[in-house]
Amino acid sequence: KAEDDKPTDIDPDELDVFTVENVNDIGSGEPLYSNFEYEDWCLLAFRIELFLLVHGFRLDVDDVERQTFHESHLPFYYNRYWKKALDPKMYNRGTTSDVVALIKDAIEIDTDSGMLEVKVSEDQTFDHFVKLAEEHRRERQRRLDAGDETAELKFRKLTPVPPAKAPVLNAAKAGQKTVIAGHRPVFQVAKNPLLKPVVVNPVKAATTASSQSAKAPHIRPAVKAPLIRPVLTNAAKAGPIKPGLTIPPQAQSSGPLKAGLIKPGTSSTQPVQGVKRPGLSIPNIAGVTQPATKVARTSFGGGAKW
């Protein structure tokens, strides 16, 4: 019985693939797909995808008159059902119809109507698609052995995406929040290599802190209020009024004063042209009352007798 349990020598190339009961063991312990290459796995997946797509479309539409769709609509429904684009360039083909021609044993396009037709029944198992892929591989190999170079398939391989790494507490970026189960969120700041650590004496730091806390707080003096200058309401605004100046009431009511300097002790509304230096005699001008012994202070800093 032990000898009967040993796997027998079976030539996989001479074996009919559709008579294999278990695709994982053809009888010698070798699986039926042992010679599959990258292109064979891609076509196996594409067969199953279109098989499920066409049958799923028929069940979703639930219309006797619409059992399938046109081959020009295949990219749209392929993206709708499988959430990815159907790129013929990945299969080294120019159009989608050329890609479907690679799996004509499962799906084909009607030459008259251009509609997709499924050649595999709805209740078929996964093993049947593996057998179709192996039969297609053997056929291509026979053609290559006969010198037909067009039977060789070269698909574009996708670049694998590296898996995302789990967040590590020490690898958190600056300002990024790290959450650990059962702990509070921790914010970490990235270390700057240009900054050197500062050594702090704890005794000196405690003494300095206590001495600073004992000092009275520094109170800055209050800012003085700005000086508000009085606003002149007289429309004349002829300048500062000199000592001894008297303005008659008739001059105030008659209108604004004319430009000029009014000498101290004058009562006339007419200004005196020019400025007289202290110590000089002033001619007798009509309308000007000049006291003989009165000394008037002027803006020149001296005194003069008028």
Image (tube, rainbow, N blue to C red):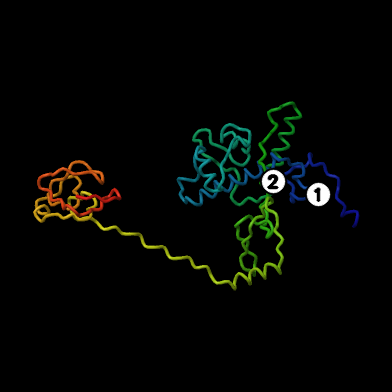
**Which residue is at 87% across, 55% downward?**
5
Which amino acid does the dot numbered 1 rest on?
A: Gly
Residue at which label 1 appears? 27
Q: Position of residue 69 (x, y in %)?
A: 49, 42
Relative to the observer, which residue lies in front, 279 or 40?
A: 279
Residue at which label 2 appears? 130
Relative to the observer, which residue lies in front, 278 or 17?
A: 278
Answer above or below: position of 76 versus 289: above
Q: Where is residue 116 in the image (x, y as percent from the top left)?
A: 53, 40
Q: What element carries label 2?
A: helix
- Figure quadrant of residue 175: bottom right
Asked if residue 204 lies left or right of residue 303, the reply is right
Asked if residue 203 lies left or right of residue 291, the reply is right
Relative to the observer, which residue lies in front, 136 or 41?
A: 41
Mark 2 and mark 1 residues within 8 Å of each other at the beta carbon: no
**Which residue is at 58% across, 50% downward?**
122
Question: Of tags 2 and 1, which is closer to the observer?
Answer: 2
Asked if residue 59 lies left or right of residue 172, the reply is left
Marked residue nearer the N-terminal end (2 or 1): 1
What's the distance in space between the residues labelled 2 and 1, CA to CA? 16 Å
Q: Where is residue 135 in the image (x, y as percent from the top left)?
A: 71, 40
Would you call the spot at circle 1 few (<14 residues within 10 Å), some (14-19), or many (20 or more)? some
**Which residue is at 31% across, 59% downward?**
228
**Which residue is at 75% across, 27% downward?**
146
Answer above or below: position of 37 versus 144: below
- Figure quadrant of residue 96: top right
Q: Where is residue 120 in the image (x, y as percent from the top left)?
A: 61, 45
Q: Is mark 1 on a helix, strand or loop?
A: loop
Which amino acid does the dot numbered 2 rest on?
A: Val
